[in-house]
Amino acid sequence: MPSAPPETRGVAFDVTIPRFVLAKTLGRVSDAALFGSLSGVRLRSLPDPTLPGEEWVKLEVLSCGICGSDLGNLTYSASPAMEPFGSFPAVLGHEVVGRVLEVGAGVRHVEPGQRVSVDPMISCATRGFAEPDWCRSCRDGYHSTCERAGEEGRVRVGGRPLRPGLTVGYHADLRGGWGDRMLAHASQVFPVADGIPDRRAVLMEPFAIAMHAVLQTPPRPGEPVLVIGSGTIAMGTIWALRATGFEGDIVAQAKRPHERTLARAMGASEVVAPGPEAREALVATGASAYMPVVGPEVYAGGGFPLIYDCVGNTASLSQALRFAAPRGRLVVIGCVAEIRKLDLTFLWARELRARGSVGYGRESWRGETRHTFEITHDLMLASDAPIEDLVTHVFPLAEYRDALRAARDHRRSGAVKVVLAPNA
């Protein structure tokens, strides 16, 4: 009898209405409904993936990070607005460093045995469309906003057209990095130099998100910058500002002592805690405080000309709007869900410019046009900042539930970036 095809493992997430109800009720008191025995998260045996075409690559996953958006999906706290642009059940994980196992005949820039990082955003090219049929975003080099995310692709994976989806890891056909093996289109993989260890390389994707935000909205020479957030994207934003040559003041707002230490190590000039310390930093810019009849304190004069909000919740956005200087710029990085009772008065009263930033793409850099991953890679290779210190926890794949607990309850665990390494 012919031998059965080899199997691999993957942490898969399936979405159903009963599991949604369990997560929103029982999930408040027990994580069993979120990623335990009652949830839609399972470590499953899966068939070994096969290349769907000549421009595809098969990877052995070396390590993959756990992202805040992963936790948002597992806890059903993310906005449902993006639901049409994913497909389930899906093997999660999009912060991937892997080793090439096999390449299609049309792949030239990587070869078996080589380590690579993965751009998880699914472009028109990944979907199998010829360049004349690419959407406007993909033609312009901004594939993270691919306009075909709700459509089936032309490439066939597993015998059927590629299902809709925006990102590897939230896709029924393209497994993410919480598993042993995965597929990627040639346009999604970027070689990793030997001088970058896995513990640093696994941060390539979140640092590229930060780099894209900084390159698209750079600070002006001499103006102070405020970075709000204690997680990997905030740390990456501080690092990206310094790595791209910014020499001005960077005020970082971080909560816990170890996060404040990391912010300084990434290049922050000053690190403040939310609350009175942050207020003092604002007043130091020349701002004066006023107390309205109803509501929190407001300010006039001074302020920060540029603020990167790496949290994106009601509190951080409200603070950013109040702390911004007239005609200041606000960059909101990452996944912002529904915001309730957000006072937008200062958006118009101070003529602020707010911009969202997602993913990565084609950047103008030192007279060249390069992908964000390439820029991040080269600067990461040259950087003497202790980037790998952001990886605070590493778990083998079989211990994914412990990994998720550490990532979700980072106040107790002290986690900044939690990583799953299949063979750890």
Image: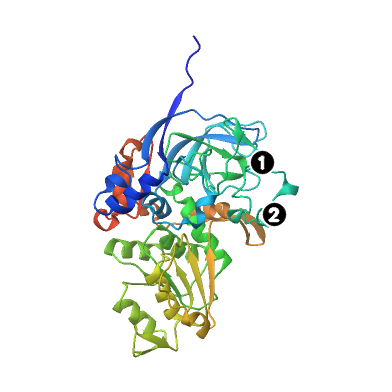
Residue 346 locus on image (x, y percent): 47, 82
Task: Give the amino acid type for the residue marked by disc 2 in the picture.
Answer: Arg
Q: CA distance from mark 2 to mark 1?
A: 14 Å
- What secondary structure is found at the residue carrying circle 2? helix
Q: Looking at the image, is mark 2 or mark 1 nearer the viewer?
A: 1
- Residue 131 picture location, percent across and down: 72, 47
Q: As displayed, is residue 388 above or below residue 48? A: below
Neighbour tally class for label 2: few under 14, some 14-19, many 20 plus, Cα within 10 Å: some
Q: How packed is label 1: few (under 14 Cα within 10 Å), some, or many (20 or more)? A: many
Front residue of 233 and 314: 314
User: In the displayed image of the protein, which residue is found farthest to the top?
Assistant: 1
Asked if residue 286 lies left or right of residue 221, the reply is left
Foreground residue among 40 and 166:
40
As helix, strand or loop, the secondary structure at mark 1 comes to loop
How did the renderer colour the structure?
rainbow
Q: Amino acid at mark 1?
A: Gly
Residue 394 occupies which quadrant of the picture? top left
- Tell how many labels: 2
Residue 252 in view here:
no
Q: Is residue 341 visible?
A: yes
Instruction: Classify 313 as above or below 195.
Output: below
Which image quadrant is residue 231 in?
bottom left
Q: Which mark is residue 139?
A: 2
Q: Quadrant of the C terminus?
A: top left
Q: Name the residue: 30% across, 39% down.
A: 399
Residue of label 1: 128
Q: Position of residue 315 (x, y in %)?
A: 37, 71
From the viewer's perspective, is residue 294 above or below residue 96? below
